[in-house]
Amino acid sequence: MATTDIGFIGLGNMGGRMSKCIVRGGGVVVGFDANPGVIAESGASPTGSIREVLERCDVILLSLPDSRVVEKVVLGPDGILVHARDGQIVVDLSTAAPESTRRIHALLGEKGASYLDAGISGGAAAADVGKLTLMVGGEPEVLEKVRPVFDHFATNIFYVGESGAGHVAKLLNNFLNAVSLSATAEVMVAGKKAGLDLAVLLDVLNKSSGVNFATLNRFPKIITGDYLKGGLSNTLMMKDVVLYTELVSQLGVSSLNASGPLAAFGLAKALGYADEISNTVVDAIGDISGGVRLHETKE
């Protein structure tokens, strides 16, 4: 590739953390964000436009809230598609609708540019230390070209199939994450109301068949008052579950388990936790269960 600078569009919660990993590894990041204030914190060199990023970089990473924003950045009047050139590689690290991803892949391909969809998992904690998991869709030979870039912030990189497959895998994973988080939150509120020692309850669950990511990694912190802020918000979790239901509907798969997380994260949004980390879904459930909190703050 002609340039070694890495373009990065979207340097917020997750994008900023991945950018820092690249910079710590010796890479140079050229950044753009709708909120210019976050660029310096990410370690990136600021730019004033998407066009400038495309002019300076052969590899461009995207970390954006949803497909609506991705399409605006890629397909907008001064977006990536307008300025893309032959040989460039654009990687979408967002959680996006696979149908939209495949459309963008085809349009960029007409200009000789490549488009990978690379769903990420691991949350803020893994992003901080460069240990994310990536599930990548697109051409395998393009993945190999950008693998050294991914190595800065990911330790598990899976090629899952053609364009859109990475975002499919991400939606499937995030749905299971949403189910386990919302269900465990309900169980922990019930345990609290039943008078159980929550640390002991978690020990039981983690040695029993109820064990899951939330019991292992989230609630041991939450019961001490640490909500692990910096991860996916309730709004974004709800968005991912809705995208999952749309995907399985297109596939002709009956979704018998979506009602739980839809209700739980919808409740969290309605009660004022929309922009809080999704772990606060336990407080939303606690609110309608008699004002329960797993951790009581001492005055």
Image (spheres, rainbow, N blue to C red):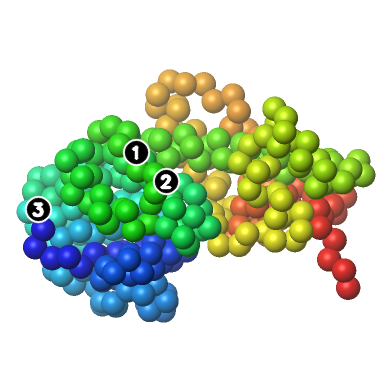
Q: Give the residue at mark 2.
A: 133
Q: Give the residue at mark 1.
A: 158
Q: Residue at x 40, y 24 (%)?
A: 251
Q: Dot 1: within a 10 Å radius of its alpha carbon, few (fewer than 14), some, or many (20 or more) residues?
A: some
Task: Mark yes or no: residue 164 visible.
Answer: no
Horizontal side, residue 144 vs residue 39: left or right:
left
Q: Which badge, 1 or 3, is on the more N-terminal residue?
A: 3
CB under 8 Å between discs 2 and 3: no
Q: Dot 2: within a 10 Å radius of its alpha carbon, few (fewer than 14), some, or many (20 or more) residues?
A: many
Q: Secondary structure at mark 3?
A: loop
Task: Using the image, determine if residue 125 lies above or below residue 5.
Answer: above
Q: Secondary structure at mark 1?
A: strand
- In what quadrant of the picture does the N terminus appear? bottom left
Kindly identify the amino acid type of the residue bearing the numbered disc 2: Thr
Q: Nearer the viewer, mark 2 or mark 3?
A: 2
- In what quadrant of the picture does the C terminus appear? bottom right
Kindly identify the amino acid type of the residue bearing the numbered disc 3: Gly
Q: Give the residue at mark 3.
A: 87
The residue lying toward the viewer, choosing from 217 and 71, is: 217
Q: Residue at x 70, y 55 (%)?
A: 221
Task: Mark yes or no: residue 30 visible.
Answer: yes
Which disc, if any, is residue 288?
A: none
Kindly identify the amino acid type of the residue bearing the numbered disc 1: Phe
On the image, the x and y values in percent for residue 141 come to 17, 41
Q: Dot 3: within a 10 Å radius of its alpha carbon, few (fewer than 14), some, or many (20 or more) residues?
A: some
On the image, the x and y values in percent for residue 228 come to 63, 59
Q: Which badge, 2 or 3, is on the more N-terminal residue?
A: 3
Marks 1 and 2, how far apart at CA:
8 Å
Marks 2 and 3, how far apart at CA:
26 Å
